[in-house]
Image: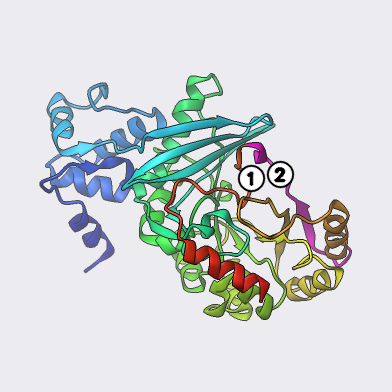
Amino acid sequence: MTPAAETSERVQPGPGPVDVLGLDREALQAWVGALGHKPFRARQLLRWLHQRGADSFAGMSDLARELREELEVRATIGAAPVLRREDSRDGTRKWLIDVGAGEAVETVYIPEPGRGTLCVSSQAGCAVHCAFCATGAQGFSRNLTSGQIAGQLWMANRELRAQGLGERPVTNVVLMGMGEPLQNYDALLPALRLMLDDDAYGLSRRRVTVSTAGMVPMIDRLARDCPVALAVSLHAPDDALRDRLVPLNRKYPLRELLGACQRYLEFAPRDFITIEYVLLAGVNDSPQQARAVLALLRTLSCKVNLIAFNPYPGSDLRRPEPAAVKAFASVLQEGGLTVTTRRTRGDDIDAACGQLAGSVRDRTEVVLRRKDAVSA
């Protein structure tokens, strides 16, 4: 069966309403066609939903009345409801979003001069269990749907527009919220295509970033299917330490991960991969470890983003001193790498990197396993 046929079959009208918020152009055209309507109606729907942020079909004035009435019965605009919003003193905003079954995820908007970045979640909880991440500390609940992923951008644009922040206040999207995006690939891909579609959000591939802890086969698939900017969570210069901090490394060790990064560069919209490195006091922040990172990355076209650990309740890890962060960065810079040190944003509302915890059922055994692994 061809990919197009698979898409058409997946969106055939059924007994229940279809969430059109998560259908990319190809899927929406197939679904509209199955209803007996022309393909250009899908383009109109995309514009109403994603450019104008429509939350009902009744006001879609350029659609035939017959189609609007049919959509009211057969379709839904399934944006997840916002349970709570918090605003940081630095302008960062965090929403807690209900994704059903008693679970909620968090979405964060970070305003900066000339840009507005939305940090989007892809799962409720996370199965990767990185030792320094609040999300992973709670374990994994379930994947989000394409509509729930794209719906975070839909919601943020609507709310920020209503406050007079421009027609498209979100200029950049980073899939760095709760979850490992590449473990939810089937739902991620349509959401990415919507973000890039000129009739939907029209974002540049350079302005959409997928972050991964190292899902090597899926990095290769993303390169073929929808190459956007790529960020890779490194956090350690050797397999022994990375096995403890990022358990996924036991399946895809550093040599395989760096090989996938090299392959991705052939398709990437940027000429570099972003390497994320969370600095943990006394764990991975020594000058010797900085030199090991330098040796590891010397042949990879990359930019290293250093992030001082953001504490969260229940973690025994510590944030490094500013002098240690500066010394680590200096080693990398003097060795010829491009280095940035991420400024902490939104930590007063637990919206900083690694602090997103949403409302996911606590898995106590997961927390205990993580503490044992880090202290080993």
Secondary structure category for the residue under label 1: loop
The three-letter amino acid code for the residue at tag 2 is Thr
Which quadrant of the structure image shows residue 94? top right
Q: Residues within 10 Å of mark 1 (few under 14, many from 20)?
A: many
Q: Residue at x 79, y 66 (%)?
A: 282
Residue 352: numbered disc = 1
Q: Say if mark 2 contacts mark 1, CB within 8 Å.
A: yes
Q: Which residues are magenta?
A: 334-348
Q: Which residue is mark 2?
A: 344
Q: Position of residue 109 (x, y in %)?
A: 57, 37
Separation of marks 2 and 1 at Cα, in angstroms: 6 Å
Considering only vertical position in the picture, is 125 above or below 103? below
Nearer the N terminus, badge 2 or badge 1? 2
Q: Position of residue 12 (x, y in %)?
A: 15, 51
Q: How many marks?
A: 2
Q: Report the quarter where the C terminus lies.
A: bottom right
The three-letter amino acid code for the residue at tag 1 is Ala
Q: Residue at x 67, y 51 (%)?
A: 311
Q: Position of residue 115 (x, y in %)?
A: 63, 35
Which quadrant of the structure image shows residue 195? top left
Judge by depth and name the residue closer to the eye, 327 or 126. Answer: 126
Judge by depth and name the residue closer to the eye, 256 or 370. Answer: 370
Res. 125 visible in picture? yes
Residue 179: numbered disc = none
